[in-house]
Amino acid sequence: LALPSYFDSVRKGRRSEAVAALAQVQQAQERWRTNNAAYTTALAASAPSGLDLKATTPEGLYGLSIDTASATGYTATAAAVAGTSQASDTNCTRMRVRMNAGNLEYGGCAGCAVPTGALTDPNRCWSR
């Protein structure tokens, strides 16, 4: 009876891996932007062509991508890798951060495939 609740707690704790990885992307994007006219979608490309970041989180629970990039913003996603415990994190299999004209927006969802539109976090994927 307590086992599902335990696994939910473990998955919630492992979301911190996605949060940390997306924070790395944010910092790398800001460094990139200081030297370039726009943000980049080149996550894994070696510097100076891209951010030189890995496409997966250290424990391999999330895959990272930069979905969109422009002169004023970008959208980055951490998506749970199939076959990992995080793929069962029903409401938060995708966690997103968006820089939008100088403002950061955070969101999380189960199946949001479109990186545009308002980011909401009704499932509280990003704890504050």
Image (spheres, grey):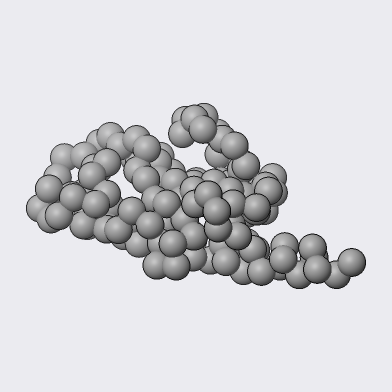
Question: Is 27 positioned to the left or the right of 82 in the image?
Answer: left
Residue at 18% x, 50% y: name it: 45
117 relative to 84, above or below: above
Q: Is residue 104 visible?
A: no
Question: Is 41 positioned to the left or the right of 105 in the image?
Answer: left
Question: Is 86 positioned to the left or the right of 62 in the image?
Answer: right
- Residue 29 on image: x %, y %: 28, 52
- Residue 34 on image: x %, y %: 18, 52
- Residue 55 on image: x %, y %: 33, 53
In the picture, the quarter occupied by the C terminus is bottom right
Residue extending farthest to the right is 1
Residue at 25% x, 36% y: name it: 71
- Residue 76 on image: x %, y %: 40, 45
Residue extending farthest to the front is 83
Between residue 63 and residue 82, name the one nearer to us. 82
In the picture, the quarter occupied by the N terminus is bottom right
Residue extending farthest to the left is 48
